Image (tube, coloured by chain):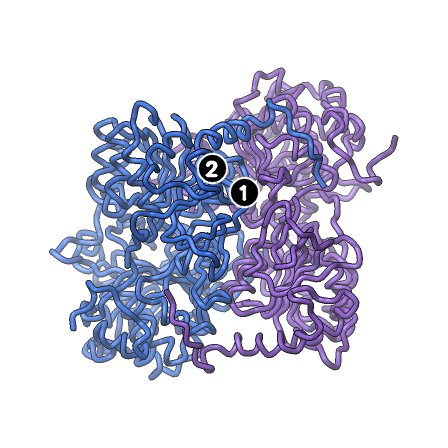
Chain colours: A purple, B blue
Amino acid sequence: MTTTISPPPQWSRRRAEKARRLDQVRNLADGVVLPSDKMVAVLEALIAPGDRVVLEGNNQKQADFLSRSLAKADPGRLHDLHMIMPSVSRAEHLDLFERGIARKLDFSFAGPQSLRIGQLLEDGQMEVGAIHTYIELYSRLLVDLIPNVALVAGFQADRHGNIYTGPSTEDTPALVEPTAFSDGIVIFQVNEIVDELPRVDIPASWVDFVVVADKPFYIEPLFTRDPRHIKPVHVLMAMMAIRGIYEKHKVQSLNHGIGFNTAAIELILPTYGESLGLKGKICRNWTLNPHPTLIPAIETGWVESVHCFGTELGMENYIAQRPDVFFTGRDGSMRSNRMMCQLAGQYAVDLFIGATLQVDGDGHSSTVTRGRLAGFGGAPNMGHDPRGRRHSTPAWLDMATPGGEGPVTLLERGKKLVVQMVETFQEGGKPTFVERLDAVDVAKKAGMPLAPIMIYGDDVTHLLTEEGIAYLYKARTLEERQAMIAAVAGVTAIGLRHDPKDTARMRREGLIALPEDLGIRRTDASRELLAAKSIAELVEWSGGLYNPPAKFRSW
Amino acid sequence: MTTTISPPPQWSRRRAEKARRLDQVRNLADGVVLPSDKMVAVLEALIAPGDRVVLEGNNQKQADFLSRSLAKADPGRLHDLHMIMPSVSRAEHLDLFERGIARKLDFSFAGPQSLRIGQLLEDGQMEVGAIHTYIELYSRLLVDLIPNVALVAGFQADRHGNIYTGPSTEDTPALVEPTAFSDGIVIFQVNEIVDELPRVDIPASWVDFVVVADKPFYIEPLFTRDPRHIKPVHVLMAMMAIRGIYEKHKVQSLNHGIGFNTAAIELILPTYGESLGLKGKICRNWTLNPHPTLIPAIETGWVESVHCFGTELGMENYIAQRPDVFFTGRDGSMRSNRMMCQLAGQYAVDLFIGATLQVDGDGHSSTVTRGRLAGFGGAPNMGHDPRGRRHSTPAWLDMATPGGEGPVTLLERGKKLVVQMVETFQEGGKPTFVERLDAVDVAKKAGMPLAPIMIYGDDVTHLLTEEGIAYLYKARTLEERQAMIAAVAGVTAIGLRHDPKDTARMRREGLIALPEDLGIRRTDASRELLAAKSIAELVEWSGGLYNPPAKFRSW
């Protein structure tokens, strides 16, 4: 099919450079298997100064043996690396910058490390290319951030270099493909090498080397919420979401973010949702990580399908025993895929619902607070109206016109439902609604061209607080949107802008709804509605299949 | 990692049903290899009435042996199938409906078959679920269109069922993964079975069966444009695009649609672009199929990288010899990937430029014309502003405000450049600018909830005709947008709305630019600027590596 002559040298510089580097470690490697105890030297040989290095670093799964090895490299040999990381999660990710091994960072999310990123920036030890959504970062690997090296993690490898990622496939395929097919070098750390893999997630032809890690890769149970911490106010808001949004718009497919608000929704579907006769009518197809709090809804037949970004620690056996619901391989274990799930969450679901730390009077929101460059993760990708969508569903069509009456002419279009669900005040009395987002000051200080906004106000269709729901998609003007936001912002500075005299009119016009407008008595919002009130009860619902991590075990 | 006990029957219906079907063909199959001469019977056993069947059917590559076999099935045994097809391209795709084997269709694109789809709809022989963009359709396979069976095409298989797709990987991975991991059945037609594959594109653990096709899968050279058909007006418009858009906004990464307009841009980069000193400053990173008309720009060093949706017939050897530019595997041949390229074209490039058949006074456009339900393909996915994008580039920031002065506050955001490039009249004197899109009438007649709009007016940032460029992103109101569109719409009905007295003001305010405003003399726009004036000259530029299909050979 293709000519077998070698490409001319001036058109195959990357391939020649790769061959040169591979030669340097050939005597160290046993076929594709690298020696675990010589990884620092191996990385010094396989990586060159100035390289673009993808390090996984994703939402949960960490190629931590490789990152720890890289951080031990000699900065005289390895310096000025351009790190590309979906998630900056571990201390050594930033040691790379402190030690002068890396210089530039392109990333998506930086949970616990966000404060230190701010500090490194201020000290001039790090240059940030940009902060991305996950899917945006994967995309750039094919365009203007083509990697030289990818350092990634799998569960098992065979001696050919085929990889079984385990249920936590995550974004590994999205990081490997651009590297493998641009003459980059792909190095997998694995927990073990076996003779026969349960299944192949990444074929050996895309993999240059595997190395057995000193200990199994680190994985964080990011999506476990203990129902004991769900408060009556969360239940109230969950009832409002089901009644005033899911039922009202016939929401059939959806994504839930993490948090106690959405966990409460998941846990009252089998009780409150059941009492409304909504089973089979709403919440059938899901794109989300396997939240343990979804177990009761699954067990009671609410959930037709769940496609997952990644897995959740402790859910492996439960998932394997529910293959009609979860995406699993022939071997029985889950196949997750962050890139595909982000796509599905962007283009194929009716609704995204999430929480945030700050909302301003226009409805812009951000999780960036003073000094913390937290990044975006996947929320902006799902928390906006995908204007390249062309298929319609009842919920999507409901958003078609500002008046909220559905499409009037054939030239209109529907909209994705983007719901922000927040309490007006957070723990410690910090107001969620603020005059000015901290993100604006962070951007100024860091010299960013634009503030790191998680979800823009004009992308939000519904704002849900313990006060009520603002149907923002009905706003005809910015002023009306601002008034609707203020109406549900409680006694925050933004909320105090609301003239209580307007409340009746706004309720009448359907711009806002209070719990009583939805037939919800605040006194009914009790923890009694939760199908499970503790982790132990989730385990019980699962028939013992859910195996929560130690830190969630209190019995 | 996972329990080895079998999942309970009530939670593994799909797996049990798959096992039942696989059993029925076990005696016919030699391992994973199915007998080519019994495929009709095999498909009758592996598929059941009412199934969701994915058939590839993508932009270029066709699983045509499988579709021809399926069309021969007994409608008494196989009926009411729900076909899911990225592209409906072949006659037998619709025979399925005429014969009563299939009933419902979800699809993205239907080039040559669009007229017949209209007819089948009218006759009540087909029900259309929805028309999608490619990426939207892949997404739904993970959510509410989870497939039972996927019928797909590869170049070669080995006896384990590993697949080499060849350079035309296309959307095969996007179709296979959702099927393979939901206990669906994946069947590959391949051109041959070999002992050792050049590389593995799809691992055997995702594949149930392979079958050798009666003849190599059909592939269409969709992206070849013969430079002989490029007219001086195309050159004029190409000069305007380079000067008035690419240079003005510093467009570094981009997608080109097919058509003589964009082919002209590609062919004058090495001449006109060079004379402006723009090499290295614009058009460095591309997402597009390997257009033969891009060869001169590649050979003269304009192009850093090209990521491809699929391949183009005849370009195989050229691509294999230019691995620094194209994404190729260790075996030397290209790896394309439609899903990933669509993602890159959506999230990672500065500009999308395309052509269309009809534009209305608001700037809405459509390729649907009377009776032809052509579908969308990928254009709407790339032809809109991805509001989940958070990284900035100079071109993107340039679009930040309606005034076009870049961001004024930190709470603004940039925009993807979406350019419509059309002549005011097409061959045969048909006006491109129309009072009312045919798509509106088609929607009415077919009972669609919304008209099939390819690109919505408010997503278009630039409209380029032979008359001039309208900088639509600067429009502050709908009325202003309409006036700007009319100003470049020539003597069409829309164009005649323009009051020529306004032209000077609009030019002064930078709302529109005529060729002379860009320093372009219409008389300079000659075919002499084309780096290649024929297919033969493209072959020459390629050093004989480009091997055009017979129908493009005229020497």
Q: State the mark number for residue B185.
A: 2
Q: In this rendering, would A494 be left or right of A351?
A: right
Q: Residues within 10 Å of mark 1 (few under 14, many from 20)?
A: many
Residue drawn where x is 42% and y is 32% of the image: B46
Corner quadrant of residue A525: top right
Of B172 and B164, nearer the camera is B164
Q: Position of residue B373 (x, y in %)?
A: 26, 41
Mark 1: secondary structure: helix
Rendered position, B164 above or below A296: below
Residue A357: percent from left, percent from top: 70, 46
Locate residue B454 relative to residue A546 in the image: left or right. left
Residue B117 point in image, percent of width and height:
25, 37
Q: Amino acid at mark 2?
A: Ile
Q: Are marks 2 and 1 in contact (CB under 8 Å)?
A: no
Closer to us: B344 or B313 = B313
Q: Amino acid at mark 1?
A: Gly
- Mark drawn on residue A541: none
Give the position of the N terminus of chain B as an image quadrant.
top right
Q: Which mark is on residue A345? A: 1
Please give the name of the residue rendered at 34% of the width and 67% of the height, measured from the top-left corner.
B315
| Residue A53 seen anywhere in this rendered image of the structure | yes
Q: Quadrant of residue A242?
A: top right
Q: Position of residue B13 (x, y in %)?
A: 55, 26
Does A230 appear above or below A153? above
